[in-house]
């Protein structure tokens, strides 16, 4: 006889939930990425033909070069995130890659053109700032980099 969840005592329900949490924690991160992507594709009525084996987590984010680290308790910038290279195609073979949460957030609402404009603006600003800094004395550059404070070992004597 199968006991319905609603017929269990609160203590039994909690034991059942705890067992389920332990079961899910034991699953690899690729499994969780797969199931969440499948749910998203179903809700958005998008194509979905990937398998768990298609999800490969690299050591570093291919866009930002930061290490990808699985943290089962809390997502952060370096957490692996399943990305659709072309979002309109859905989760299909050849259209997914694992990147960092940070990179995926940066790509989330931007078009390719907007990302290129953004990247070019960053490069222009960086080049302009670098040119300005090269005109400064070394101690002034250190002041700038340290937010206006020099450490004793950085002072020129």
Image (spheres, rainbow, N blue to C red):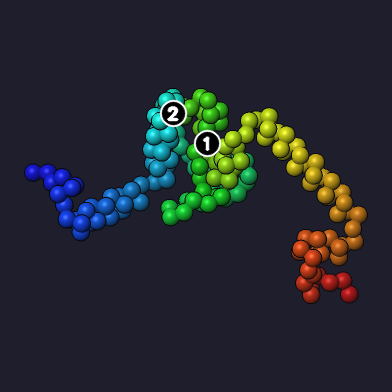
Residue 50 shows in the view: no
Mark 1 Cα shell of 10 Å, populated few (<14), some (14-19), many (≥20)? many
Place of residue 115 in the rendered image (x, y in percent of width and height, measured from the top left): 67, 35
Q: What count of labels does the image hold?
A: 2
Left or right side of 115 for 155: right
**Dot label at residue 52:** none
Q: Quadrant of the C terminus?
A: bottom right
Residue 53 picture quarter: top left
Name the residue furthest left. Answer: 1
In the picture of the structure, the residue carrying the numbered disc 2 is 44
**Residue 29 screen position, x and y as percent:** 42, 45
> Which image quarter is the N terminus in?
top left
| Residue depth check, mark 2 versus mark 1: number of the one nearer the observer | 2
Picture quarter containing residue 50?
A: top left
Q: Determine the secondary structure under disc 1.
A: strand
Say which of 58 and 143 sits in front.
143
Please tell me which residue is depicted at 82% across the width and 45% down the height of the picture: 127
Q: Position of residue 118 (x, y in %)?
A: 71, 38
Q: Residue at x 35, y 47 (%)?
A: 27
In this figure, which residue is indicated by the disc labeled 1?
Answer: 83
**Residue 15 is drawn in which quadrant?**
bottom left
Decide: is 74 above or below 154: above
User: Would residue 29 appear left or right of 157 to someone viewing this image?
Assistant: left
Q: Tell me the distance, in whole angstroms, between the alpha carbons under discs 2 and 1.
A: 15 Å
**Which element is circle 2 on?**
helix
144 sits to left or right of 82 = right
Badge 2 or badge 1: first in the primary sequence:
2
Image height check: is 124 above or below 46? below
Is residue 83 visible from the viewing direction of this image? yes
């Amino acid at each position: 006889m199968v006991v319905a969840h609603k017929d269990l005592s609160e203590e039994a329900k909690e034991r059942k939930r705890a067992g389920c949490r332990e079961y899910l924690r034991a699953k690899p991160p690729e499994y969780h990425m797969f199931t969440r992507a499948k749910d998203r594709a179903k809700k958005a009525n998008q194509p979905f033909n990937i398998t768990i084996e298609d999800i490969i987590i690299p050591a570093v984010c291919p866009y930002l070069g930061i290490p990808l680290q699985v943290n089962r308790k809390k997502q952060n910038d370096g957490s692996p995130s399943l990305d659709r290279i072309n979002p309109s195609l859905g989760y299909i073979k050849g259209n997914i890659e694992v990147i960092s949460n940070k990179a995926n957030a940066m790509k989330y609402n931007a078009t390719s053109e907007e990302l290129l404009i953004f990247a070019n603006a960053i490069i222009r600003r960086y080049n302009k700032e670098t040119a300005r800094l090269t005109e400064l004395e070394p101690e002034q550059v250190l002041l700038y980099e340290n937010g206006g404070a020099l450490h004793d070992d950085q002072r020129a004597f």
